[in-house]
Image: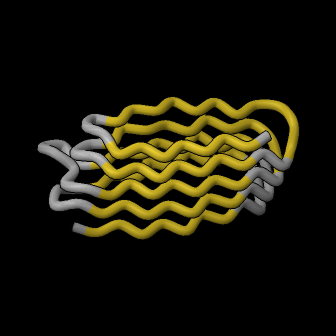
Amino acid sequence: NTILITANAQSVKNDIDVSGGNGNKVTMTLSSDKATNSIKTNGAFNEFSVVQEGIAGTSGHQLTIDNTGSSNIFGIHQSGTIDTTVSIKNAGNGSTFTVGTGN
């Protein structure tokens, strides 16, 4: 399964729940004044790419990841003029997280 989200909008909010199966791919490219997103996954060998860019409003960009499974790959990049926040909960082994944030 593949999920592709590209948004250029104000106050973007996405809740992605990937459960069952392996080899799913989620790509989110968001340009907004504020982006609040969550990814919940249960499985293995899934790939996630999240880019959050833009002014980021008064509360900044936020991403929450709840990963249960092994050998998943996460690539995260956030940038904006206000704080950016990435929260990661991981239960499993062998997953890779690459996170870059900045104002």
Residue under the point 49% across and 46% down:
6
Residue at the extreme left of the image, as rendered? 58
Residue 27 shown left or right of residue 84 in the figure: right
Q: Position of residue 84 (x, y in %)?
A: 29, 55
Q: Position of residue 23 (x, y in %)?
A: 84, 49
Residue under the point 69% across and 45% down:
91
Q: Nearer the viewer, residue 38 or 12?
A: 12
Q: Which quarter of the image is occupied by the N terminus?
A: top right
Above or below 90: residue 51: below
Q: Position of residue 34 (x, y in %)?
A: 26, 43
Q: Quadrant of residue 67?
A: top right
Residue 81 shown left or right of residue 69 in the figure: left
Q: Nearer the viewer, residue 43 or 50?
A: 50
Residue under the point 72% across and 49% down:
25
Above or below 45: residue 97: below
Report the colour scheme.
Answer: secondary structure
Above or below 23: residue 96: below
Q: Which quarter of the image is occupied by the C terminus?
A: bottom left
Residue under the point 52% across and 49% down:
28
Q: Nearer the viewer, residue 54 or 68?
A: 54
